[in-house]
Amino acid sequence: MKAPQGALFLCRIPEEPEFMPQGGLVILDGIQDPGNLGTILRTADALEVPVALTDGCADLYNWKTVRASMGALFRSQPPRLPWQDLTARIKAAGIPLAVTALSNRAEDIRTADLSKCAVVIGSEGQGVRRELLDLCDR
């Protein structure tokens, strides 16, 4: 960094946690910017919202992700799985899959009860991948 904060530490990258499907889960699909990923993880941690990542998301341990997460990454490490595995396990658990997208079927997120769903948020440039849109229940 051009202007480092003066803190330096080393740590082991923890083993990836086992994925446990549950209602209220947020699935990040292809989030590309490490700073955005860290910010989302920080917010989800503050709200005690579980997070999972699809393949194609930014590196969890990129320095920008770590910095933007403000330590959240070390409290709640999200599992990373191929989207096919994530959706198969979510469907097998009977959890509805909701995606954030503009469509004729869209509900207003301000009034939708998503506490029992797994909600997919897509990448900054592409949105939610077509395959996930085709699988969604809401």
Image (cartoon, grey):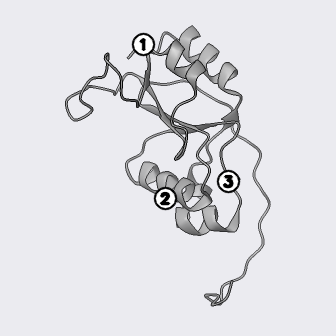
Query: Measured from the top left, where is residue 30 in percent x and y?
Result: 62, 40
Q: Is residue 4 above or below residue 119?
A: below
Which residue bears the numbered disc 1?
A: 137
Position of residue 88 relative to residue 80, above or below, is above
Residue position for label 2 = 39
| Element at label 2 | helix
Q: Which residue is mark 3?
A: 60
Q: Quadrant of residue 49?
A: top left
On the picture, is 78 further left or further right than 50?
right
Q: Secondary structure at mark 1?
A: loop
Which part of the image, by quadrant, shows the N terminus? bottom right
Residue 26, above or below 107: below
Q: Amino acid at mark 3?
A: Leu
- The C terminus: image quadrant: top left
Kind of residue indicated by mark 2: Thr
Which residue type does callout 1 highlight? Answer: Asp
108, 87: nearer the viewer: 108
Q: Quadrant of residue 79?
A: top right
